[in-house]
C-alpha cells in the first residue's frame, strides 16, 4: 500500500517561494505508468490540479500556474517536490500530493498540509 506524506513550511511570506516535498513509501516514483501530482484546495473552494511529474521524469503543469510552478523529484529519496514562486495570499490552501495510474483517478493521496501566505 503506497503512502504519501507532504512536508514543508506552514507559513510563507508574500513574494517568496513556497516549497513542499512529498515523501512516498510502499512504492517507487519511477514505477511505470504512475503520475505524481500536486493538488491544492483554497479555503472555501474546490480542488485545483497544479501539475505532475511522471514515472519517467516528464513534467506537466496547469496552464494557469505554469509560469511560476516547478515540480522535480529525487529518486534516491523517493520524493517529489513542488516550488511555487512569487506567492500571494491567494495561494493560501491545503496542498496535497497524489498518485494516479495512467492519468486515471487519483487513487492515493497524502493527508494534506496547510500553507498560509501572509506577512
Image (cartoon, grey):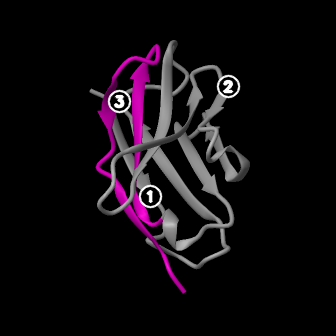
Residue bearing mark 3? 26
Residue bearing mark 2? 58
Verify whether residue 113 appears in magenta.
Answer: yes
Q: Decide: few, some or many residues near mark 2? Use Cα within 10 Å; few <14, some 14-19, many ≥20.
A: few
State whether residue 119 is above or below residue 67.
below
Q: CA distance from mark 2 to mark 1?
A: 22 Å
Quarter of the view holding residue 84: bottom right
Question: Is label 2 in contact with label 3 (beta carbons under 8 Å)?
Answer: no
77 to the left or right of 26: right
Q: Nearer the viewer, mark 2 or mark 3?
A: 2
| Residue located 62% across and 40% down the image | 74
**If the image is split into quadrants, where does the N terminus sit?**
top left
Residue bearing mark 1? 7
| Residue that protrudes farthest toward the bottom in the picture | 119
Q: Earlier in the sequence, mark 3 or mark 1?
A: 1
Residues shaded magenta: 92-119
Amino acid at each position: 500500500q503506497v503512502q504519501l506524506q507532504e512536508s514543508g513550511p506552514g507559513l510563507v511570506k508574500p513574494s517568496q517561494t513556497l516549497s513542499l516535498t512529498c515523501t512516498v513509501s510502499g512504492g517507487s516514483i519511477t514505477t511505470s505508468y504512475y503520475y505524481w501530482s500536486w493538488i491544492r484546495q483554497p479555503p472555501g473552494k474546490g480542488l485545483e490540479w497544479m501539475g505532475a511529474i511522471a514515472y519517467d521524469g516528464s513534467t506537466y503543469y496547469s496552464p494557469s500556474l505554469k509560469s511560476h510552478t516547478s515540480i522535480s523529484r529525487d529518486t534516491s529519496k523517493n520524493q517529489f517536490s513542488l516550488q511555487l514562486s512569487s506567492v500571494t495570499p491567494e495561494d493560501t490552501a491545503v496542498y496535497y500530493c497524489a498518485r494516479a495510474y495512467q492519468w486515471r483517478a487519483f487513487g492515493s493521496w497524502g493527508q494534506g498540509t496547510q500553507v498560509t501566505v501572509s506577512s
